[in-house]
Image (cartoon, helix red, strand yellow):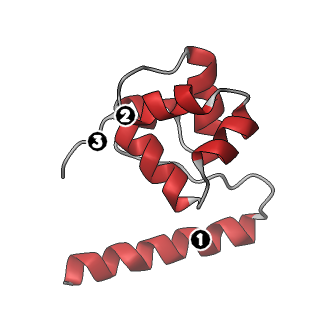
């Protein structure tokens, strides 16, 4: 698996959420040019902006900076039953992938 840099991850996450550069910059209180520079790997986000980006995209800072390949899912507000259903669905996807 190809390891993506922070810029590529930020861009992919933004596109997956169907957000524009302007929408993300407004939500985070940063300029469009700064966000664009992050996505183009021309500039690294500050610690505070890294935290804001991780929260917006529901991933860990470790994922963004490349310390882990694992993305996290925010299950706050869900019941134990709902969380278990999600875990079962993930297991089914993994089993299907192994069988192929």
Q: Residue at x 73, y 28 (%)?
A: 29
- Of tags 3 and 1, the one toward the viewer is 3
**At numbered mark 2, what does the secondary structure look like: helix, strand or loop?**
loop
Query: For this view, does 10 lie left or right of residue 54?
Result: left
Residue sitting nearer the eye, 49 or 55? 49
Query: For this view, does 26 lie left or right of residue 10?
Result: right
Query: Quadrant where the C terminus lies?
Result: bottom left
Pointer 3: what residue? Answer: 4
Residue 49, given in percent of the width and then of the height, sits at 61, 23
Query: For this view, does 80 lie left or right of residue 86?
Result: right
**At numbered mark 3, what does the secondary structure look like: helix, strand or loop?**
loop
Q: Residue at x 19, y 48 (%)?
A: 2
Q: Earlier in the sequence, mark 3 or mark 1?
A: 3
Badge number at residue 40: 2
- Of tags 3 and 2, the one toward the viewer is 2
Rendered view: 1 above or below 25: below
């Amino acid at each position: 698996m190809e390891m993506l840099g922070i810029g590529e991850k930020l861009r992919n996450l933004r596109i997956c959420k169907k957000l524009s550069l302007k929408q993300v910059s407004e939500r985070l209180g940063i300029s469009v040019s700064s966000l664009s520079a992050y996505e183009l790997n021309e500039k690294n986000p500050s610690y505070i902006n890294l935290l804001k980006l991780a929260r917006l995209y529901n991933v860990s800072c470790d994922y963004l900076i490349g310390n882990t390949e694992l993305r996290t899912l925010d299950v706050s507000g869900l019941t134990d039953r709902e969380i278990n259903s999600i875990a079962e669905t993930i297991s089914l996807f993994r089993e299907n992938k192994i069988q192929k």
